[in-house]
Amino acid sequence: MRLAWHDPQPLAPAQFPDYEQAHIARASRGEAVLGFARLARCALVGAFEDPRRTLRLSYIGERFPVVRRLTGGGSLSLDPDTLVAVLAAPAGPYEAMAPDALMSALAAPLLAVIRGYGIDAVFIAPNDIVVAGRKLGSVFARQHAGVVLFEAVVPLALDVEELLKTLRLPLEKLSEKGLLAARQRFAPLSTLVPDLLPGPLGARLAAETAQALGRCAHREPPPVLREETPCAAVVDGGPVADVQAFLKTAGGVLYLDVWLDPGALIREARFTGGVICLDGGLLARLQASLAGTDIKQAESTLAKALGASPPDIVGVDAADIIYLGHLCAARFHVGRRLGLAAATQISVFSPDRAASVETLLGAIDAVLLPYCAKPTWCKWRHRDGCPECGRCAVGEAYGLARARNLTVITITRYEHLQAVLSDLKNQGARAFLGVCCTDFFLKRDYAFIDAGIPAVFLDIGGDTCYTLRQEEAAYAGRFEAEASVDARLLGRLLAWRDRLAAVDGGAGNGAGAEGSLDAAPSLI
Ligand code: SF4
Ligand code: SF4
């Protein structure tokens, strides 16, 4: 049996879906096909990603296209200096493998090729090829109708600045210092193997892959593709969801967006995220299970829909998906109590996933505020403290916290946050109210996980380190984000906290039964 393979070919981004389908069509007839593409400048998003969350669309604009691939995983910023390997083969022995094992098995030939160049690379779950802590490449997979599709993306050279502008990463990384630090995080193959050419690299990978599949490598011309057609729209411009929840898992961030009818029945649900879901139809089936369900039943509905077998998602288990349903219902509950039109600003962090919103709120002992919400002209911006001069919402937040004898701290940098969390833990703080942007929580969640203190988070608005309203200044590294705290909402959250604490005598057990969204008395 043969592994048909072809040399790297330049490809227009719009042709990539056709290229994938050409591979899959042959694999579904029992063939194994490996091809190499060098895509023109584009953003390649994972099968389940929401480009609005992962791409800086304001920068991309008409500059280059956004294309969706069939495999899950994160968004990529590509140009012809990146080699994209696409393998399609009958699933055979891979069919019975657990998702993590499958990824590792499929990445093995690429790892062997890289090690053949004398580079001590390793595979790091869920999908990275890494050398000395620096990222060298990424791998993605999907398994459908008896065919396994595997895609490996290896930058031979990398324009880090373009990458940072394309993907939604903090703007300070575009400063000179930030770019230097970002470059240290990547190891493009050409910097490790001088004079490396894509052709010989492809030939080596074809030989290793053929060996792993027990087939003979057979070189052939690249597939004939349809003429370049306009890219299908991958950015959904529809209305924002009524309720959103997210969960960071070992396999990436998973989001659940829900649109409701006036009776709080789910009209539409959508899972998105940079996760590698091998079963391409699983998330769609889970979405369908939620349609017509009362949002308060989202957790139990998902548990029923998932059944006993573990989901085919790398680094995500059934409990994660079910908990996401719980978080969505909890956000809806908070939104209703606070009279919010869309429950998108408040999230909860319960280290053991057991505490109800009421439990967490009633136990708040401290308020943490980000420096970025202070005006850029305020001399307290990069310092802890605030004399409450009355000229910004941070002052109001300080007043609200101090009136309740709560500890209130301005977080001035990441190391400061770590120190503050450690102090709070040592002081026995039961929970804190943290004000920060969602991106910060997602990127730095390990600081909160390490500290293990339950928290309620209030999302900031306005310009954040991740928005791009001052592009030119940002590229020059002069951007200073000025976010905003919704002091009114913070006040209502703290008022709710006061009533919960009073009902509970300050013991922090809250008024609601654990995990129950209905049992708590209506306090607001
Ligand atoms: S209220 Fe505080 S943070 Fe805001 S401007 Fe005045 S001193 Fe600065
Ligand atoms: S909270 Fe968000 S916007 Fe503010 S400094 Fe931190 S990362 Fe930047």
Image (cartoon, rainbow, N blue to C red):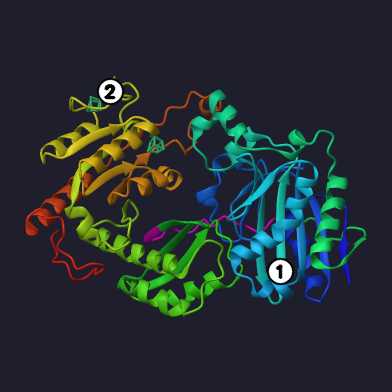
Magenta segment includes 240: yes
218 lies left or right of 495: right
Secondary-structure class at tag 1: strand
Mark 1 or mark 2: which comes first in sequence?
Answer: 1
Q: Which residue is mark 2?
A: 380
Number of marks in picture: 2
Quarter residue 4 falls in? bottom right
425 lies left or right of 475: left
Mark 1–mark 2 Cα distance, whole angstroms, equals 56 Å
Secondary-structure class at tag 2: loop
Quarter residue 372 falls in? top left
Considering only vertical position in the picture, is 371 above or below 379? below
The label number, if any, that marks residue 148 in the structure image: 1
What is the three-letter code of the residue carrying label 2? Answer: Trp
The verdict on label 2 being within 8 Å of ligand 1 is yes
209 lies left or right of 299: right
> Can I make out residue 78 in this image?
yes
Magenta segment includes 269: no
> Can I make out residue 70 in this image?
no
What is the three-letter code of the residue carrying label 1? Answer: Val
Quarter residue 18 falls in? bottom right
Give the magenta-colored segment's residue range: 231-245
